[in-house]
Image (cartoon, rainbow, N blue to C red):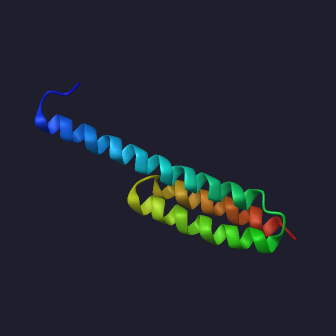
Amino acid sequence: MPRLKSAKKQMRQSRAHRVRNRAQRTTLRTAIKRVRVAASKAAAETAYQLAEQLLDRAARRGLIHRNTAARNKSRLRAVVSKLT
């Protein structure tokens, strides 16, 4: 356990950040999965738009790297375009 006041504060902040990041990462992964399992092209397009927004937001906030977001968006777009 930390003894210094600043170390205690950092531990509290780390805990809060971890909880927030975990929730955002879970939401992001779920959105990506919804694009991949969409039954129709229309459903996939709708799911893709949400996933794209979440990926961009996660990259802006540093949750994931911006190149990772771009790669995921590119792969999801390919999945959507293959659907008929």
Quadrant holding the N terminus: top left
Name the quadrant containing residue 78.
bottom right
Above-or-below relation of 80 to 26: below
Judging depth in this view, the residue of 66 and 13 nearest the camera is 13
x and y percentages locating residue 69 in the rendered image: 54, 58
Judging depth in this view, the residue of 9 and 52 nearest the camera is 9
List the single residue furthest toward the right: 84
Residue at (68% x, 67% y) in the render = 47
Quadrant holding the C terminus: bottom right
Residue at (78% x, 75% y) in the render = 42
List the single residue furthest toward the top: 1
x and y percentages locating residue 74 in the rendered image: 64, 62
Residue at (50% x, 56% y) in the render = 67
Left or right: where does residue 8 sit relative to residue 75? left
Name the quadrant containing residue 34.
bottom right
Judging depth in this view, the residue of 64 and 39 nearest the camera is 39
Numbered label tally: 0
Above-or-below relation of 75 to 7: below
Residue at (82% x, 65% y) in the render = 82
x and y percentages locating residue 79 in the rendered image: 76, 61
x and y percentages locating residue 59 in the rendered image: 45, 59
Left or right: where does residue 33 sit relative to residue 37? left
